Image (spheres, rainbow, N blue to C red):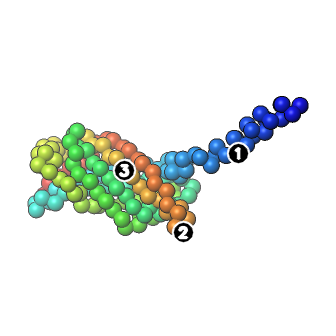
Amino acid sequence: MKRLLTPVFLLALLAAFLPACTNTSRIIATGLEIEVTGIERASDGTVTASWQIKNPNIVAYLISRVKHKIVLNGVNLGSIDESEPLPLPIGGKGGRTSKLSGVDAAATRVLTEAASLGSANYRLDTQITILVYDDTFEKAGLTHSGTVSVKAR
């Protein structure tokens, strides 16, 4: 009987500790969707991207930091680092228009071509930091690809 209880006890103990090792950021960010809604190049060469995060969940979030990397037609367009908090209401969305940094000559060429066509394919790789409770933060990655409107002024 003692031989049977020891393995059963060890399995129960293991099962009790494994949930503590789960990736909570994956659970917290489940359902969040991110997308680029527009890209615009100003006459002075400044490039901005409008983006939004949709929250279909029954919990509101406070996004404390967002880092985007945008690829346009297969070329790295640039990055965005937003540190201004962004509230996401229950079942709602939040977004911004942000200036891109790291726009090089190849990105400018792709942007000019895309602006002449009016749209382009994009991929958005995003790292968000969510304020969970007081000083507790969770990081999560979101990715989205699609077609976006591109304009030049």
- Label 2 element class: loop
Quadrant assignment, res 58:
bottom right
Residue type at numbered disc 2 = Asp
Label pair 1/3, CB-CB below 8 angstroms? no
Task: Quadrant for the C terminus, please.
Answer: bottom left
Horizontal arrangement in the rendering, residue 115 relative to residue 126 (left or right): left
Q: Which residue is the extreme one toward the right?
A: 1
Residue type at numbered disc 3 = Thr
Quadrant assignment, res 99:
bottom left
From the top left corner, tell me how far across and down residue 54 is, in percent: 44, 53
Residue under the point 29% across and 50% down:
69
Q: Nearer the viewer, mark 2 or mark 3?
A: 2
From the top left corner, tell me how far across and down residue 128 is, in percent: 41, 55
- C-alpha gap between disc 2 and disc 3: 23 Å
Q: Nearer the viewer, residue 120 or 126?
A: 126
Residue under the point 38% across and 44% down:
143
The relative height of residue 123 versus residue 100 in the rendered view (above or below) is: above
Q: How many marks?
A: 3
Residue at mark 2: 134
Residue at mark 1: 16
Mark 2 or mark 1, earlier in chain = 1
- C-alpha gap between disc 1 and disc 3: 33 Å
Label pair 2/3, CB-CB below 8 angstroms? no
Q: Nearer the viewer, residue 25 or 95?
A: 25
- C-alpha gap between disc 2 and disc 1: 27 Å
Label at residue 41:
none
Residue type at numbered disc 1 = Ala
From the top left corner, tell me how far across and down residue 126 is, in percent: 36, 50
Neighbor class of circle 2 (other Cα within 10 Å; few <14, some 14-19, many 20+) is few
The relative height of residue 50 versus residue 77 in the rendered view (above or below) is: below
Residue under the point 36% across and 65% down:
83
Residue at mark 3: 126
